Image (cartoon, rainbow, N blue to C red):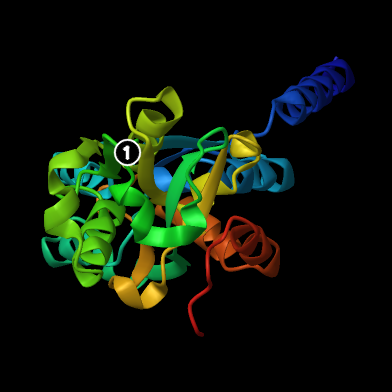
Protein backbone atom coordinates (compact mmCIF):
# COMPACT_ATOMS: atom_id res chain seq x y z
CA UNK A 1 0.00 0.00 0.00
CA UNK A 2 2.81 2.37 0.96
CA UNK A 3 4.55 1.61 -2.33
CA UNK A 4 1.36 2.39 -4.27
CA UNK A 5 0.89 5.73 -2.47
CA UNK A 6 4.53 6.67 -3.10
CA UNK A 7 4.15 5.79 -6.77
CA UNK A 8 1.05 7.98 -7.02
CA UNK A 9 2.87 10.89 -5.40
CA UNK A 10 5.80 10.55 -7.79
CA UNK A 11 3.42 10.43 -10.76
CA UNK A 12 1.61 13.52 -9.53
CA UNK A 13 4.88 15.41 -9.15
CA UNK A 14 6.01 14.39 -12.64
CA UNK A 15 2.66 15.45 -14.12
CA UNK A 16 2.90 18.83 -12.38
CA UNK A 17 6.40 19.38 -13.69
CA UNK A 18 5.27 18.46 -17.20
CA UNK A 19 2.37 20.93 -17.04
CA UNK A 20 4.62 23.72 -15.78
CA UNK A 21 7.16 23.14 -18.53
CA UNK A 22 4.38 23.23 -21.10
CA UNK A 23 3.33 26.75 -20.06
CA UNK A 24 4.29 29.34 -22.69
CA UNK A 25 7.15 31.65 -21.78
CA UNK A 26 6.07 35.05 -20.51
CA UNK A 27 5.78 37.42 -23.46
CA UNK A 28 7.95 40.53 -23.43
CA UNK A 29 5.91 43.71 -22.96
CA UNK A 30 5.22 45.83 -26.02
CA UNK A 31 7.13 49.10 -26.03
CA UNK A 32 5.07 52.25 -26.55
CA UNK A 33 7.22 54.72 -28.46
CA UNK A 34 6.42 58.37 -29.21
CA UNK A 35 8.40 59.77 -32.12
CA UNK A 36 8.79 62.91 -34.20
CA UNK A 37 7.08 62.74 -37.59
CA UNK A 38 10.38 62.89 -39.53
CA UNK A 39 11.07 59.35 -38.25
CA UNK A 40 7.84 57.85 -39.61
CA UNK A 41 9.62 55.68 -42.20
CA UNK A 42 13.03 55.09 -40.66
CA UNK A 43 11.85 54.21 -37.17
CA UNK A 44 9.16 51.87 -38.49
CA UNK A 45 11.85 49.88 -40.28
CA UNK A 46 14.07 49.94 -37.20
CA UNK A 47 11.20 48.72 -35.02
CA UNK A 48 10.39 45.90 -37.46
CA UNK A 49 14.04 44.80 -37.48
CA UNK A 50 14.15 44.88 -33.69
CA UNK A 51 11.02 42.76 -33.33
CA UNK A 52 12.44 40.15 -35.72
CA UNK A 53 15.63 39.97 -33.65
CA UNK A 54 14.14 40.02 -30.16
CA UNK A 55 10.43 39.27 -30.38
CA UNK A 56 9.69 42.57 -28.63
CA UNK A 57 6.83 44.48 -30.25
CA UNK A 58 7.41 48.22 -30.70
CA UNK A 59 4.26 50.30 -31.09
CA UNK A 60 4.90 53.72 -32.67
CA UNK A 61 2.99 56.96 -32.36
CA UNK A 62 4.11 59.89 -34.57
CA UNK A 63 3.40 63.58 -34.05
CA UNK A 64 5.16 66.91 -33.63
CA UNK A 65 7.82 66.79 -30.92
CA UNK A 66 6.19 69.57 -28.90
CA UNK A 67 2.79 67.89 -28.96
CA UNK A 68 4.31 64.59 -27.80
CA UNK A 69 6.15 66.39 -25.01
CA UNK A 70 2.86 67.71 -23.68
CA UNK A 71 1.30 64.25 -23.90
CA UNK A 72 4.15 62.80 -21.83
CA UNK A 73 3.80 65.57 -19.25
CA UNK A 74 0.12 64.71 -19.01
CA UNK A 75 0.88 61.05 -18.33
CA UNK A 76 0.63 59.42 -21.75
CA UNK A 77 1.92 55.82 -21.33
CA UNK A 78 5.01 56.04 -23.51
CA UNK A 79 8.16 54.06 -22.76
CA UNK A 80 10.39 56.07 -25.11
CA UNK A 81 10.36 59.48 -26.76
CA UNK A 82 12.29 60.26 -29.95
CA UNK A 83 12.30 64.02 -30.50
CA UNK A 84 13.37 65.99 -33.58
CA UNK A 85 15.55 68.13 -31.32
CA UNK A 86 17.39 67.92 -28.00
CA UNK A 87 15.44 70.70 -26.30
CA UNK A 88 12.18 68.85 -25.71
CA UNK A 89 13.85 65.81 -24.06
CA UNK A 90 15.91 68.15 -21.88
CA UNK A 91 12.76 70.01 -20.83
CA UNK A 92 11.18 66.72 -19.80
CA UNK A 93 14.27 65.86 -17.77
CA UNK A 94 14.23 69.29 -16.11
CA UNK A 95 10.57 68.87 -15.12
CA UNK A 96 11.16 65.37 -13.75
CA UNK A 97 9.17 63.71 -16.52
CA UNK A 98 12.12 61.85 -18.07
CA UNK A 99 15.21 59.99 -16.93
CA UNK A 100 18.29 62.19 -17.36
CA UNK A 101 20.67 59.25 -17.56
CA UNK A 102 18.82 57.88 -20.59
CA UNK A 103 19.26 60.93 -22.85
CA UNK A 104 20.70 59.93 -26.23
CA UNK A 105 21.52 62.10 -29.24
CA UNK A 106 20.77 59.61 -31.98
CA UNK A 107 20.86 61.63 -35.22
CA UNK A 108 21.13 65.01 -36.92
CA UNK A 109 18.33 65.84 -39.33
CA UNK A 110 18.45 67.79 -42.59
CA UNK A 111 15.94 70.23 -44.05
CA UNK A 112 14.97 70.18 -47.73
CA UNK A 113 12.84 72.28 -50.06
CA UNK A 114 10.51 69.82 -51.78
CA UNK A 115 8.20 70.06 -54.82
CA UNK A 116 6.08 67.43 -56.60
CA UNK A 117 7.77 65.41 -59.33
CA UNK A 118 5.51 66.88 -62.03
CA UNK A 119 6.18 70.46 -60.98
CA UNK A 120 7.91 72.69 -63.56
CA UNK A 121 9.87 74.22 -60.68
CA UNK A 122 13.51 73.25 -60.26
CA UNK A 123 14.22 73.06 -56.52
CA UNK A 124 17.97 73.16 -57.22
CA UNK A 125 17.51 76.91 -57.69
CA UNK A 126 16.87 77.10 -53.96
CA UNK A 127 14.92 79.95 -52.40
CA UNK A 128 14.56 81.59 -55.81
CA UNK A 129 11.71 79.29 -56.79
CA UNK A 130 9.57 80.63 -53.94
CA UNK A 131 9.03 83.81 -55.97
CA UNK A 132 7.75 81.99 -59.02
CA UNK A 133 4.17 83.13 -59.74
CA UNK A 134 3.00 79.50 -59.65
CA UNK A 135 3.92 79.20 -55.95
CA UNK A 136 0.79 80.36 -54.16
CA UNK A 137 1.33 78.39 -50.95
CA UNK A 138 4.48 77.26 -49.13
CA UNK A 139 4.07 74.47 -46.57
CA UNK A 140 6.06 74.21 -43.34
CA UNK A 141 5.53 72.40 -40.04
CA UNK A 142 4.11 74.47 -37.21
CA UNK A 143 7.16 76.12 -35.60
CA UNK A 144 5.31 76.23 -32.27
CA UNK A 145 5.55 72.45 -31.96
CA UNK A 146 7.89 71.15 -34.67
CA UNK A 147 11.68 71.68 -34.76
CA UNK A 148 11.67 71.34 -38.56
CA UNK A 149 9.16 74.18 -38.73
CA UNK A 150 11.48 76.38 -36.68
CA UNK A 151 14.36 75.34 -38.92
CA UNK A 152 12.37 76.39 -42.01
CA UNK A 153 11.62 79.80 -40.54
CA UNK A 154 15.28 80.23 -39.54
CA UNK A 155 16.45 79.28 -43.05
CA UNK A 156 14.06 81.75 -44.69
CA UNK A 157 15.19 84.51 -42.37
CA UNK A 158 18.85 83.65 -42.90
CA UNK A 159 18.30 83.98 -46.66
CA UNK A 160 16.56 87.32 -46.12
CA UNK A 161 13.34 86.20 -47.78
CA UNK A 162 11.00 85.41 -44.89
CA UNK A 163 9.06 88.68 -45.04
CA UNK A 164 8.60 88.30 -48.79
CA UNK A 165 7.03 84.84 -48.55
CA UNK A 166 5.35 84.98 -45.13
CA UNK A 167 1.88 85.49 -46.64
CA UNK A 168 2.29 82.28 -48.66
CA UNK A 169 3.08 80.06 -45.66
CA UNK A 170 0.63 77.36 -44.58
CA UNK A 171 1.41 75.30 -41.50
CA UNK A 172 0.95 71.59 -40.92
CA UNK A 173 0.81 70.24 -37.40
CA UNK A 174 3.99 68.30 -38.11
CA UNK A 175 6.48 67.70 -40.93
CA UNK A 176 4.41 64.85 -42.39
CA UNK A 177 1.32 67.03 -42.69
CA UNK A 178 3.38 69.78 -44.32
CA UNK A 179 4.49 67.23 -46.91
CA UNK A 180 0.89 66.12 -47.42
CA UNK A 181 -0.06 69.70 -48.30
CA UNK A 182 2.46 69.58 -51.14
CA UNK A 183 1.52 66.07 -52.26
CA UNK A 184 -2.17 67.01 -52.41
CA UNK A 185 -1.53 70.19 -54.38
CA UNK A 186 -2.70 72.47 -51.57
CA UNK A 187 0.83 73.92 -51.58
CA UNK A 188 3.21 74.12 -54.51
CA UNK A 189 6.38 73.76 -52.42
CA UNK A 190 7.29 72.91 -48.87
CA UNK A 191 10.08 72.49 -46.36
CA UNK A 192 10.26 68.89 -45.14
CA UNK A 193 12.75 66.49 -43.61
CA UNK A 194 15.25 64.86 -45.94
CA UNK A 195 14.21 61.58 -44.31
CA UNK A 196 10.74 62.11 -45.72
CA UNK A 197 11.94 63.04 -49.20
CA UNK A 198 14.11 59.90 -49.55
CA UNK A 199 11.68 57.43 -47.94
CA UNK A 200 10.86 54.43 -50.18
CA UNK A 201 7.18 55.42 -50.22
CA UNK A 202 8.12 58.81 -51.71
CA UNK A 203 10.32 57.57 -54.53
CA UNK A 204 9.33 59.26 -57.79
CA UNK A 205 6.85 61.58 -56.08
CA UNK A 206 9.01 64.66 -55.66
CA UNK A 207 12.18 66.65 -56.25
CA UNK A 208 14.16 68.39 -53.54
CA UNK A 209 17.04 70.70 -52.69
CA UNK A 210 18.99 70.22 -49.45
CA UNK A 211 19.00 73.51 -47.56
CA UNK A 212 22.58 74.41 -46.51
CA UNK A 213 23.14 73.31 -42.92
CA UNK A 214 24.55 76.72 -41.98
CA UNK A 215 21.18 78.35 -42.79
CA UNK A 216 19.47 77.03 -39.65
CA UNK A 217 20.38 75.76 -36.16
CA UNK A 218 21.52 72.11 -36.16
CA UNK A 219 18.66 69.61 -35.96
CA UNK A 220 20.33 67.42 -33.34
CA UNK A 221 17.72 64.83 -32.35
CA UNK A 222 17.43 63.21 -28.95
CA UNK A 223 15.68 60.27 -27.31
CA UNK A 224 14.80 59.81 -23.66
CA UNK A 225 12.89 57.41 -21.38
CA UNK A 226 9.87 58.99 -19.64
CA UNK A 227 9.93 58.72 -15.86
CA UNK A 228 6.56 56.98 -15.68
CA UNK A 229 7.50 54.19 -18.11
CA UNK A 230 6.67 50.76 -16.72
CA UNK A 231 9.26 49.09 -18.96
CA UNK A 232 12.45 51.06 -18.45
CA UNK A 233 14.73 48.03 -18.80
CA UNK A 234 13.21 47.09 -22.16
CA UNK A 235 13.27 50.74 -23.26
CA UNK A 236 16.96 50.98 -22.43
CA UNK A 237 17.62 47.82 -24.46
CA UNK A 238 15.89 49.36 -27.48
CA UNK A 239 17.99 52.51 -27.08
CA UNK A 240 21.03 50.24 -27.09
CA UNK A 241 19.86 48.83 -30.42
CA UNK A 242 19.62 52.38 -31.81
CA UNK A 243 23.36 52.73 -31.23
CA UNK A 244 24.30 49.62 -33.19
CA UNK A 245 26.10 49.81 -36.53
CA UNK A 246 23.10 48.20 -38.27
CA UNK A 247 20.74 50.94 -37.12
CA UNK A 248 23.28 53.70 -37.73
CA UNK A 249 23.60 52.62 -41.35
CA UNK A 250 19.84 52.59 -41.75
CA UNK A 251 19.57 56.13 -40.38
CA UNK A 252 22.26 57.24 -42.84
CA UNK A 253 20.25 55.77 -45.70
CA UNK A 254 17.36 57.96 -44.65
CA UNK A 255 19.53 61.06 -44.89
CA UNK A 256 20.38 61.53 -41.22
CA UNK A 257 23.86 62.40 -40.07
CA UNK A 258 25.20 60.68 -36.99
CA UNK A 259 26.49 62.67 -34.01
CA UNK A 260 30.17 62.63 -33.26
CA UNK A 261 30.92 60.10 -30.54
Residue 173 falls left or right of residue 257: left
Residue 25 falls left or right of residue 152: right
For residue 159, which quarter of the picture?
A: bottom left
Residue 141 falls left or right of residue 240: left
Q: Quadrant of the N terminus?
A: top right
Residue 14 falls left or right of residue 112: right
Residue at 25%, 48% in the rendered image: 228
Q: Which residue is mark 1?
A: 135
Percent x, y for residue 44? 56, 40
Local packing at callout 1 (Cα closer than 10 Å; few below 14, some 14-19, many 20+) is some
The answer to whether any part of residue 61 appears in the image is yes
The answer to whether any part of residue 35 appears in the image is no
The image shows residue 52, relative to residue 124, as above or below, that is above
For mark 1, give the secondary structure: loop
Task: Work out whether residue 205 or residue 42 is closer to the camera in this orientation and state it.
Answer: 205
Percent x, y for residue 18? 80, 25
The image shows residue 44, relative to residue 220, as above or below, that is above
Task: Work out whether residue 46 or residue 186 is closer to the camera in this orientation and state it.
Answer: 186
Task: Work out whether residue 88 or residue 212 is closer to the camera in this orientation and state it.
Answer: 212
Task: Work out whether residue 208 or residue 230 is closer to the camera in this orientation and state it.
Answer: 208
Percent x, y for residue 41? 55, 42
Residue at 14%, 48% in the rendered image: 166
The count of marks equals 1
The image shows residue 153, relative to residue 55, as above or below, that is below
Q: Residue furthest bottom?
A: 261
Residue at 33%, 45% in the rendered image: 132
Percent x, y for residue 174? 30, 40
Residue at 68%, 69% in the rendered image: 245
Amino acid sequence: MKLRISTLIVCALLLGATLLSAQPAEKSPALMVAAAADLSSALQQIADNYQKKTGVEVKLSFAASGALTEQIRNGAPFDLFFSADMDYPRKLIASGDAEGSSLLEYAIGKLVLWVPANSPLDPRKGFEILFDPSVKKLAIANPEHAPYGRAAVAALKHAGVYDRVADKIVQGENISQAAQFVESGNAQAGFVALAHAVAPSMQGKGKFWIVPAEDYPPLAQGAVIPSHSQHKKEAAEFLGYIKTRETSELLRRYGFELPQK
